[in-house]
Amino acid sequence: MPTSLDRDALLTLDVDVLVPAALEGVITEDNAAQVRASIVVEGANGPTTQAADEILTDRDVLVVPDILANAGGVIVSYFEWVQSNQAYQWRESEVNDRLAERMTNAWHAVVEHAGAHRITYREAATALAVRRVIEAHDLRGLYP
């Protein structure tokens, strides 16, 4: 017989990896101290509040931020746009290979930047994103 759990109980289960993947703001300052996972991978947009993020950081919980963890869908949407503009279809294996390469490179860049600057993965991912926007603006201008 299936047993159901409420959201708060689910977030505090004794698990290695917690993946909040549906709603924004589910890990809050009210429940972050009870999260028992050592890794939180944000599958949803903004599932962790800023106050909760600070609590998790203080507790040495590794947080893979949404800007990195759920970027695959955005990347594949871009691939679809490119294919549409080229009037050419890539094989599924090509899409998967290109996605894996981009995601792996992004992961390594975030980990390297975080380590070099002694900051969280969220801070590193955000810093790298802002830097890329600045570089694109410098190269292309405001309205390319």
Image (cartoon, rainbow, N blue to C red):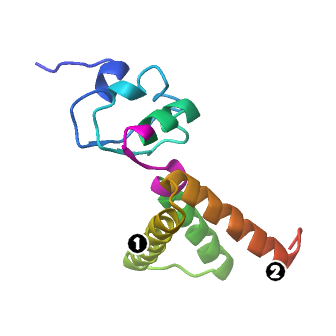
Q: Identify the residue at horizontal 86%, vertical 74% (top origin).
A: 144
Queried whether the magenta region covers residue 71, the answer comes back as no
Return the residue at label 2.
Answer: 139
Q: What residue type is disc 1 on?
A: Ala
Residue type at mark 2 is Leu
Q: Nearer the viewer, residue 86 or 24?
A: 24
At which x and y percent is residue 76?
Answer: 52, 65
Q: Which residues are magenta?
A: 58-69
Q: Secondary structure at mark 1?
A: helix
Residue 89 visible? The answer is yes
Residue 27: x and y in percent read 45, 29
Residue at x-position 70% and y-position 67%: 131
Residue occupied by mark 1? 100
Whether residue 21 is visible here, answered yes or no, is: no
Q: Nearer the viewer, residue 144 or 32?
A: 32
Up-down relation of residue 77 to residue 83 (above or below)? above
Q: Residue furthest left?
A: 1
Picture quadrant where residue 18 is located: top left
